[in-house]
Image: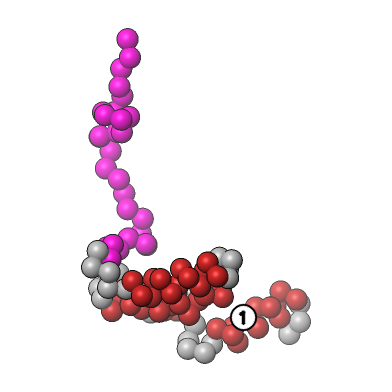
């Protein structure tokens, strides 16, 4: 005799899922940031999914989501972005540190 544990399709109905601290925001059902999303995905596809080369598109997409209240507003530095125009300088500094030069 076969018994199903936890409900239909093996799901555990007694436990409630716990959302992660970050990354939880409403889906863009109204397609308010579709252009920014498509630009970012197109960049990723054309550059072989090297996300560091598409950071400007990623930043634009996140800014759009914040402006349209699709995610909590945060300082871009908290999301891994430096000041405007600072991305190249910080990349050069990181390369210097990796190479061991000052």
Pointer 1: residues within 10 angstroms few (<14), some, or many (20+)?
few
The residue at 56%/75% (across/down) is: 53
User: Residue 67 at x, y = what percent?
Assistant: 28, 79
Residue 51 in view (yes/no): no
Camera-nearest residue between 58 and 18: 58
User: Residue 8 at x, y = what percent?
Assistant: 26, 29
Question: Pointer 1: what residue?
Answer: 91
Q: Quadrant of the N terminus?
A: top left
Residue 102 in view (yes/no): yes
Camera-nearest residue between 4 and 22: 4
The stretch drawn in magenta includes residue 17: yes
Res 49 → quadrant: bottom right
Q: Quadrant of the C terminus?
A: bottom right
Q: Is residue 24 above or below residue 100?
A: above
Query: As drawn, is 87 to the left or to the right of 38?
Result: right
Magenta segment range? 1-28
């Amino acid at each position: 005799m076969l018994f199903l544990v936890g409900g239909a399709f093996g799901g555990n109905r007694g436990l409630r899922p716990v959302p992660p601290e970050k990354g939880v925001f409403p889906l863009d059902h109204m397609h308010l940031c579709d252009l920014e999303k498509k630009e970012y995905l197109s960049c990723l596809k054309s550059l072989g999914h090297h996300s560091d080369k598409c950071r400007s598109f990623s930043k634009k997409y996140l800014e759009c989501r914040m402006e349209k209240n699709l995610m909590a507003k945060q300082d871009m530095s908290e999301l891994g972005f430096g000041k405007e125009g600072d991305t190249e300088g910080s990349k050069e500094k990181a390369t210097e540190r990796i190479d061991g030069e000052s």
